[in-house]
Amino acid sequence: MKIALAFGVVSAAVVLQGCGQRSSPSPTPAPAVEPPPGEASTGPQRSFSFLQTRGSHIVDEAGRIVRLRGVNLGSWLLMEPWMIGIGNEQTIESEKDLWDTIRNRFGEDKTRKFIRRFRDTFITEADIASIAALGLNSVRLPVWWRVTDDPLYGEENFSRIDQCIEWCRKHGLYVILDLHGAPEGQNATAAINGESAFAGLWSSDDAKRRTRNWWKAAASRYRDEPVVAGYDLLNESIDADFETMLSFYDVLMEDIREIDDRHIIFLQDGLHGFHRLPRPADRGWSNVVYSFHFYPQNDQEGEMAVGRLLPAFHRTAMDLDVPVYVGEFNTIQQSRGGVEELYRYLQLFDFYGWSWSLWSYKKIEDNPDYNWGIAGYREDASFPKVTEAEADELEDAIRNLATKPGEKNPLLAAALGAGLFVPDDIGSDDEDMRWFDARTSMALPASRDGIRLEWQVSRPHFGFWGFGDSTAWKVIAHNRERHAVTLRMASTEDTIPLQVWINGVLARTLEIPGTGGWRTFEDRSLGAYPLETGVNWIEIRAGERNDAYINARALAIRPSPSSDSDLSENAIWLKPATITPSRIPRDYKIAWNEQPPHIGYWPSGTPVGWTIRLAEGGRYRALAIYSSPNSQSQLQIFRDREPLASQYLASSGGWDRFRSRDIGTFDLGPGEHVISVVWSSTNTYACGNLREIRLQRTGPVSGL
């Protein structure tokens, strides 16, 4: 493969080319290293403990962070014909199609023999050893329900899963159990379901019952098994109604928790949108990890993934405060970034603290432009035509699916085995100064082509700012007092105009000197500001129309004795990032995937609240930026339940067409205020999308 991989990964490929060769029937386990308390565990485990969630982290029973870094064992316990070289037979789209065709041609006994041969061959203990040898610590195990429940296509028990767990125990890998193909199908894609099912799960009470029974049986069997990291309930339920999918999650979780209250439950967005998943507490969920799958659909998405698309998932993760598991991902081919860009994905996942599993460990492939798997590359990846080949030819072809030495993608193996990305220390000599980098910040673009996350060798930064773009840092203050704020940045500009916003209030507009180069990072003081105990949002906004702005790497706070009182308060912006968490109703969703984000799915008549603190206050004019297809709706603004302003909103012309509307003028005096916004419409399901409400000060409080 003609790929040059950055940061020394190519040099590792030579070492890793031979990983997984079958030197013995029982491979030697890879060496395991136990991290000290507090340090993330990412490699093969010497011992296992039950995993659980704590905030945005997965931790073991000792409280140590565990990052699940692994691969999918795709096409083994749910075989996808395209992954074993079957691509030219229209009648064989799924595993069931394959075995049914063979059964019709050669009978039941021969079919059972072929099924056993395939599952004995495609993945073996040697493959598990190869995965561990890369320094990974987990596998995601996609399963077709018939493998355990239907004797025509499986063993009518969990023996194959048991076998995989024992191999993984020996080699130090956690197992995430994934119901990849549910009874009658959770989506309409035959290859993914294992059969042509047309998403029948969602309309069949019997299919739901069998799915519930499957998970009850799995939970009963593995409730005392620490090698099992958790249960991935349903794979890619794209053809379900989203709320129906969530309701079935409720049912499955209740079933499992009655049997097993220790294992993590992995909940996918079903390809409906990661931002649409609810806050776990809103549905009574606990010990859950949220999961999404990411495949760039074209070359442009491949280029934008690290800079803009994946940071949008990070905004959701920050908002929901749950651990993230990228259950499937791949760049697929060179034109979408290839292995080099996939390595950047891994760095980004590690930087954000996400767990991940590549799709997939193995695919039979003869085109080096594709990087679907680590194993399975060979000169001829074709499979005999099932409707014409003789039985002996098919048996030889199945036997030939075994992993062979030398049939590896060395660059992909090197990228996966490169180790945890740990950025350089960003501290300073000042022990009282606490730093926050892009892991605790949201990039908030004002347009689709706005600010993006950029990567250098040591640590990412925010660059390519447009007018109105901002970054919002989530910082924790230990005490309610003034803090000096410092920005680590680089710029070729002589002076840089910017705005500092504290918890949604414009605090100061200032100019700071440049640093003389785009990679010359220096610290610049932004002044001292009052912060509240606990979570605060410090937002840095671009102050002019200039693409050549700054590269912002990190922000720091330090308690300050300063008594500065020249805070602006000329503007207040009520926007998604600064909503008071306790004042977000259950049914609201924030579209963090959008550029810029907005509040959506606004049920009629339900309030959303912001807590605003002002030193002087003033008289403010309110301007709403919204979109709605509804012919008429009403937006009301309240302060501490007191009506302040109200305005009827006309249709903007669609859900994605935003417009502005003057809501009214009112006073906000000094002190703390709870500002609530209520949107009402005859469309009770959703009034519209609210991007922000801008409060611009027009003068002092009336009468002063």
Image (cartoon, rainbow, N blue to C red):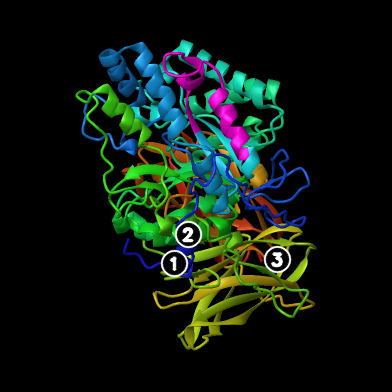
Label 2 to label 1: alpha-carbon separation: 7 Å
Mark 2 residue type: Ala
Residue shown at the point (70%, 78%) measured from the top left: 428
| Secondary element type, mark 3 | loop
Expressed as whole percent of the image width and height from the top left, the position of residue 334 reads 31, 58
Residue 615 badge: 3
| Secondary element type, mark 1 | helix
Range shown magenta: 142-168
Frontmost residue, 408 versus 24: 24
Bin the neighbour count of mark 2 within 10 Å (Cα to Cα): few under 14, some 14-19, many 20 and up.
many
Q: Nearer the viewer, mark 2 or mark 3?
A: 2
- Residue 685 among magenta residues: no
Question: Residue under circle 2?
Answer: 414
Label 2 to label 3: alpha-carbon separation: 56 Å
Determine the image quadrant of residue 170.
Answer: top right
Mark 3 residue type: Ala
Q: Is residue 236 visible?
A: no
Determine whether 117 is above or below 472 in the image. Answer: above
Residue shown at the point (30%, 52%) measured from the top left: 298
Label 1 to label 3: alpha-carbon separation: 57 Å
Q: Are marks 2 and 1 in contact (CB under 8 Å)?
A: yes
Bin the neighbour count of mark 3 within 10 Å (Cα to Cα): few under 14, some 14-19, many 20 and up.
some
Frontmost residue, 541 versus 294: 294
Frontmost residue, 509 versus 303: 303
Expressed as whole percent of the image width and height from the top left, the position of residue 664 reads 50, 52
Residue 10 badge: 1
Frontmost residue, 316 versus 154: 154
Q: Which of the marked residues, 2 or 3, is nearer the chain's N terminus?
A: 2
